[in-house]
Amino acid sequence: MKITLSRFSLLITVIMILTLTIIFAVGSPIAGLAHTVERDDTLTPLSTQNDLCTVVSSPVNPAQLSSNHSPWTDSRMRAAEPYPLPIFIYNPTATAPQQFSGDPVFIPGEPPDDFSPASQQQIPGTLSAEALLGYTYPAPYTRYENFDDYTRFPYSTTGVLFFSQNGRDFRCSAASIGNNALWTAGHCVHDGSGSTDGWSSDFLFAPAYKDGSMPFGSWTSNQSATCSGWKEDGNFQVDFGGVLLEENTSGKEVDEVVGSLGFAYNLNPNQHWFSLGYPSQSPFDGKTMQICAASFARNDAGFGFPFPIAIGCDQTRGSSGGPWIINFSGSQGNTNYINGNNSYRYIGFGEEMYSPYFGEQAKELLNFLSNETRLRTNIHIPIVVTGD
């Protein structure tokens, strides 16, 4: 009996050590590139935009840019890892009423220069804010591979974002939002550790990417931005980021060539979204654009206000940063509004995706990206389209 108890005690001790090791290994949001994280349910709700989103941007050192970056060859792109999609180990918190900080705002996007926009802009309606609709898990959704022409607006605005972070090459998803800027997830531009070394670099954006082909070419950058709440604390309430691109080798800005999505914020969460992304983990291979069509499922009240939003969607790692578009309308012109981005999910809830709520915090980052004048380094990250 004593021997049995001793062995049992030893077993319990080993389990406790292993458990603590795992918790400490994944305790920080993305630092060390752990893809499974533990949520702090004691977070105090934050109510002002400055609590969460003082916009911070990456440092740019022209001397470093000229020496630290190797060409983005075909083989380097193929070897880039899909960025780990953050996955929490606790169950999501039940839906709670979302608070609104202002009137709904819709900012139109622009089709590419060679596109004839619709003669009449269609403004999306919002449902009553009195009660959230929502679903229990699993929420209904339809996920399909883009069967349309990838170079057709608004599909053309979305593509694969290649970059380096902490010495490794990764890939996320991103979309053009005007002013030669991209919208993506915060964890794609900074690891959320608070460190200056956590910034991503060596960005290459390939819009309308398909089967390794880049029909519009590529745009590069080393400048990005996110909210202080993400950079310093890895707070998923503000897991969004932006990249400020250089002109391409033909002197064109990305939105001149592929167009840009509109932007909507302070909306009632009762919306229907089309979530676009390039998931790269099985059963996907990252070669095609996948789309989830889904309506509001629930808020994640565990983070405090503003509550992140869930929809039904089974996209995997590599889809991070992909836009959630409302009033998705094919080639109708100024009707496609980004109103979310792929951010995180929970263990055991593989058919559900969360996005930060787009409120005043998202507006702060958008304002920065829409008005920022880039530091022109005259240094383009080398790109080799074919060959190794």
Image: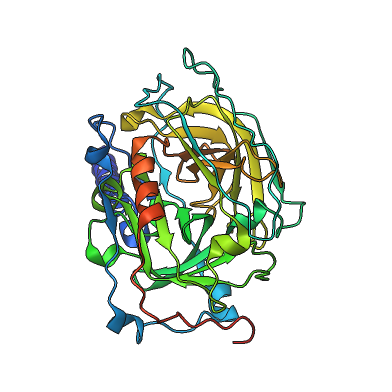
Q: Viewed as shown, does residue 323 lie left or right of 89?
A: right
Specify whether residue 314 is in view: no
Residue 144, placed above or below residue 269: below
Q: Does residue 174 lie above or below 233 as drawn?
A: below
Q: Measured from the top left, where is residue 2 in percent x and y?
A: 22, 39
Q: Pinpoint residue 131: horizontal percent, then vertical percent.
A: 48, 13
- Determine the image quadrant of residue 103: top left
* Quarter of the figure that contains the C terminus: bottom right
Q: Is residue 211 above or below residue 262?
A: below
Q: Position of residue 370 (x, y in %)?
A: 41, 53
Of 385 and 312, nearer the camera is: 385
User: Viewer-proximal residue, 153 or 356?
Assistant: 153
Q: Residue at x 61, y 80 (%)?
A: 385
Could one spot residue 53 in this view of the protein? yes
Place residue 62 in its image quadrant. Answer: bottom left
| Residue in the picture at 46% in, 53% down | 184
Above or below, comparing residue 120 to residue 152 in the picture: above
Hey, which residue is sitting farthest front in the picture?
119
Coloured how? rainbow
Q: Which of the 4 image quadrants contains residue 169? A: bottom left
| Front residue of this view, candidates 303 and 173 | 173
With 36 as the anchor, is 298 left or right in this view?
right
The residue drawn where x is 34% and y is 40% is: 361
